[in-house]
Image (cartoon, rainbow, N blue to C red):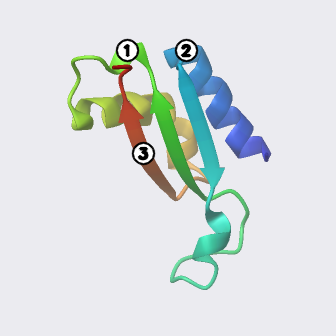
Amino acid sequence: MGIVAETIRSKLETTFAPDELVILDESHLHAGHHGHTGRDETHFAVAMKATSFAGKSRVERQRMVYEVLADELAGQVHALRLSLNAPE
């Protein structure tokens, strides 16, 4: 796992203490796409289950994550695919 992925993991674990967290670097899937610079660690998929998402809408959950990862999204991370759920 690369430095950006580790930073994402650390921030999400610290903020949300998730029951489940999976982070996939999907950057290689975007090679050759318009705007792809060839840099590593630009596209991620995050699947997370956390109690703090209980009672929140999909948009509210996404906003919570975007706020925590604002620096990464303003910098190297070009795309973030999210699957965010509360424990059942």
Reading the image, the residue beneath label 2 is 17
Mark nearer the N terminus (1 vs 2): 2
Determine the residue located farthest toward the front in the rendered image.
88
Q: Which mark is residue 52?
A: 1
- Position in image of residue 40 (x %, y %): 73, 62
Mark nearer the N terminus (1 vs 3): 1
Residue type marked 2: Ala
Measure the C-alpha gap from mark 1 to mark 2.
Answer: 9 Å
Helix, strand or loop status at disc 2: loop
Which of the pair 50/32 is nearer the observer?
Answer: 50
When the figure is inspected, residue 74 is found, relative to residue 30, above or below; the finding is: above
Residue type marked 1: Ser
Q: Residues within 10 Å of mark 2 (few under 14, many from 20)?
A: some
When the figure is inspected, residue 7 is found, relative to residue 30, above or below; the finding is: above
Mark nearer the N terminus (3 vs 2): 2
Q: Left or right: 88 with respect to 57?
A: right
Report the residue at 58% width, 50% height from top: 75
Q: Are marks 1 and 3 in contact (CB under 8 Å)?
A: no
Q: Are marks 1 and 2 in contact (CB under 8 Å)?
A: yes
Q: Quadrant of residue 65?
A: top left
Reading the image, the residue beneath label 3 is 82
- Position in image of residue 51 (x %, y %): 39, 14
